[in-house]
Amino acid sequence: SQELEQSPQSLIVQEGKNLTINCTSSKTLYGLYWYKQKYGEGLIFLMMLQKGGEEKSHEKITAKLDEKKQQSSLHITASQPSHAGIYLCGADISPGAQKLVFGQGTRLTINP
Amino acid sequence: NAGVTQTPKFQVLKTGQSMTLQCAQDMNHEYMSWYRQDPGMGLRLIHYSVGAGITDQGEVPNGYNVSRSTTEDFPLRLLSAAPSQTSVYFCASRTSGRTDTQYFGPGTRLTVL
């Protein structure tokens, strides 16, 4: 979606390093979702953020929502090979929660 | 619960052929959507539905038709397939509240020759 921009589009990091993926919306965010996709497979839900300043963590993955900047970041601490895949952010950009649009994805590679 | 199911998993069509991608969910979700995923493009919304009998267009609706006669089913129809429709198609469903996540099916990989 042109309404959601992810950066970077591709990321290669060494195992054990930290990394951050950003998702920026050109429209008001009514909800922000992070998904992970293994190559050639379906989407796995990671986290959902709704309120400005909200921060959630799951294992070594933390996501934050900056409502004023209309931006979310996904941070992985001490990356592992299991973190490799495509990370997608999705957002509700309509007040009625009717359409969930997605960014173009970030392809993450973890080198041993 | 089976969640969101899609059939077929793989399909090869010739240009001009028609077909229907099936999607069903058993979670009594009001909202259902169809997305396509192309390399480097993330997911793009094709059509969505907020309930039985109600559908609307997403970002890339051209070449696709949908209908929603029941809460459970949301088929996607390609009336005359084109090579540009070669993609992976995902169906998704969610409840009407924004507090719930969207659940995705396993996808259908379509190739149009």
Image (cartoon, rainbow, N blue to C red):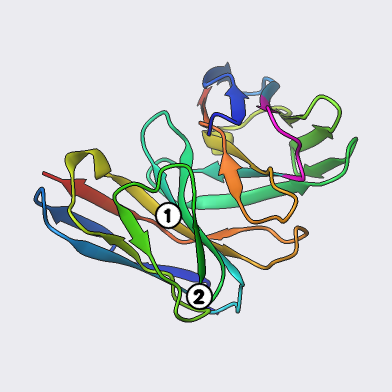
Residue B33 visible, this angle: no
Q: Position of residue B33 (x, y in %)?
A: 50, 59
User: What numbered label is drawn on residue B53?
Assistant: 2
Who's the residue at 46% across and 61% down the image?
B105
Q: Position of residue B64 (x, y in %)?
A: 32, 54
Real-space Cα separation, disc 2 to disc 1, in angstroms? 21 Å
If you read the primary sequence from the N terminus, does the residue marked by circle 2 or circle 1 appear first?
A: 2
Q: Amino acid at mark 2?
A: Gly
Who's the residue at 18% across and 40% down the image?
B83
Residue B42 visible, this angle: yes
CB contact under 8 Å: marks 2 and 1: no
User: What numbered label is drawn on residue B90?
Assistant: 1
Say above or below: A42 vs A84: below
**2 vs 1, front mark:** 2
Mark 2: few/some/many CA within 10 Å (<14, 14-19, 20+)? few
Who's the residue at 53% across and 77% down the image?
B52
